[in-house]
Amino acid sequence: MRSRKTGRIARAVLALTLTPVLVATACSSDPGGAEKDAVSSSPPPPAVPDPAARPGSLDGPPLPVQDAAPCAQNGGGTPVGGPRDGDTGPAGPIADNPEIATGYRTGMTPVATASYSVSTAHPLSTLAACEVLADGGTAADALVTAQAVLGLVEPQSSGLGGGGFLVYYDRDTRQLETYDGRETAPAAATADYLRHISPEDTTEPQPDARRSGRSIGVPGILRLLEMAHRDHGNREWRQLFDPAVTLADNGFDISPRLAESIAASAEDLARDPDTAAYFLDGGAGKTAGTRLTNPAYAKTLTAVATEGADAFYTGAIAEAIVEQVSTQREGITPGAMTLDDLAGYQAITRDPVCSPYRDHAVCGMGPPSSGGTTVDATMTMLADKDLAAYPPVDVNADGGLPSPEAVHLVTEAERLAYADRDVYIADPRFVPPPLGSPLTLLRPGYLAGRAELIDPDRSMGEAEPGDFAFDSRGVFTGPEHGTSHISIVDANGDAAALTTTVESAFGSFQMVDGFLLNNQLTDFAAEPRDEAGELQANRVQPGKRPRSSMAPTLVFDGSPLNRGELRAVVGSPGGSRIIQFVVKTLVGMFDWGLDPQQAVGAPSFGASNSPETAVGGEHPAVAGDAAALTGRLTELGHKVSTEDQSSGLSAILRQSDGTLVGGADPRREGVVLGG
């Protein structure tokens, strides 16, 4: 760990000021350092801000940093309430839909800070992490605190029983690292693990694969956080859990979004005595404003804080997890996880994947996440398209309405990128990518040829994958609905993008020692063979990590081999649409000159490899009058959907003078804080 002045973490996480402010501090940092593998000795100079551009945007004038207390909340935007009038919510069970949307906070304003910034999906998590940064902690320190609090106040999305992917930048060494904390299948798992109770009993696990013990993978998030803290933290590990322990003991109020998620999942939460007791009251979901305490979670965190992650992966907590997963209970098929599975789990550091875009390098997570390669491939194919010529119209604080020409170009590139993703990306230990490297899919010449397939006047509907001497057709990724994201830049200039998940909302609906267990194994293909009888690459195998769409992303000046200064931190939950959410935010900031709040708040749009093009109907501009957009897309051959989308984007942009400008998704309850 780097040695810096230590101090106590502030404990004031039980109250938030709602005064809309922008905060400042006298802290500054020296760029320093040099890229070891750089092609040239210095990065390109920063662009001179265009005075006509929007304040707070990439090339615009610096957003004024107002003088206020560090970590004071920006209250811009209307409160997140229930669904819009007349909206009955998503159709079908919550297990088959993204986390329910809880409205759209209009008019949110970007938050400008001089030294450090953090954005998470819940105000209490953001505040706790911000106070770690204010006390001199690193981005890695703040991640630990943020995740510990999120697991308490946003349990439907992430927690100790889940996993995640982290992209981390150390400014002193100029090193970029990625951490894989994805859950794994137990050693006893078979190819039929998700579809048959046993070789003799070929009925489906009960009540279904998701709600049974079969969906629960070996959790990875704590090993990831421990590794990142060991490499980059400077605060005592035990201190970083204090805010979450205090909240768990003293209580917190159920937020509107959590209350709506509980109500939508009440029937499933009732199956487990612990989840029923915690989330329900007389069989109905506890309502917004209800005070919750979680002494079991406080006890678990105290053990982890004192003994490290080993307290989770061995000993009493591990025994409780295995008992919960493997015990035969009425109506619930057990899983095969053992104490050895938990004790043997390791987070993995992997090589990042980076691609050029304009004058920047876009860097993300490689396999088993498909997010980094798919975002990078999309952006590279768009690099020769003049997206700046097709800006959004009626731009306001909510980002305006995208043009049909831009939506067409972006979604066509996404179709091509998803086609490769669907075929070539899985756990690299089991399914090596083409020619042994995911960078094969990002070769400039290859992607230039793919980009030529984009017809400006007609949608391709469905794209064919590129032709490599390798084919893993049938790779499947289920939707990661119970997911969250954390973006951080610390005072030293280190940056972290962590996407963290329990898979579906409330994971497997099974609770142990105050935290929920994931249902991550449903990201595997339940059928081991495809319709042609070929083995599916993403089938269940012992110790394997299911493919993911999570796309934590860092953007730098310069090129992948000559990275300059950090420019942006971006990420989102949202299942397979995570990739689309990140792409539209990058395009918004780097092509259209939107500030981060406008970019994350702008209408979501995108396409996987299907004829459907999705435009988020939860946005006021789309819910109002988007006929010109949807009509033109239809003329271009798109099958347009305007169903609500549930992103949870957070973005931090560093302007040329070093000002950090942050944005939080108005579709969720998060905020940006800093100093």
Image: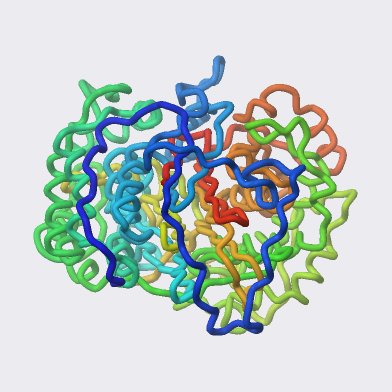
Q: Position of residue 661 (x, y in %)?
A: 54, 46
Query: Residue 473 lies in what quarter of the image?
Result: bottom right
Question: Is 477 or 148 nearer to us in this picture?
Answer: 148
Question: Is 405 or 517 nearer to us in this picture?
Answer: 405
Query: Residue 238 lies in what quarter of the image?
Result: bottom left
Q: Is residue 390 visible?
A: yes
Q: Is residue 430 visible?
A: no
Residue 569 is left or right of residue 56, and the answer is left
Position of residue 546 relative to residue 612, above or below, is: below
Question: Is 312 or 251 nearer to us in this picture?
Answer: 251
Q: Residue at x 83, y 55 (%)?
A: 386
- The color scheme shown is rainbow
Q: Position of residue 619 (x, y in %)?
A: 62, 30
Q: Position of residue 330 (x, y in %)?
A: 20, 42
Question: Is 77 or 202 nearer to us in this picture?
Answer: 77
**Count of numbered badges drawn on the protein:** 0
Position of residue 429 relative to residue 635, above or below, is: below
Position of residue 479 relative to residue 349, above or below, is: above
Position of residue 283 relative to residue 310, above or below, is: above
As drawn, the residue found furthest toward the right would be 457
Q: Residue at x 31, y 41 (%)?
A: 155
Q: Position of residue 502 (x, y in %)?
A: 36, 50
Q: Residue at x 27, y 49 (%)?
A: 148
Residue 332 is left or right of residue 246, and the answer is right
Residue 646 is left or right of residue 189, and the answer is right
Q: Residue at x 65, y 78 (%)?
A: 440
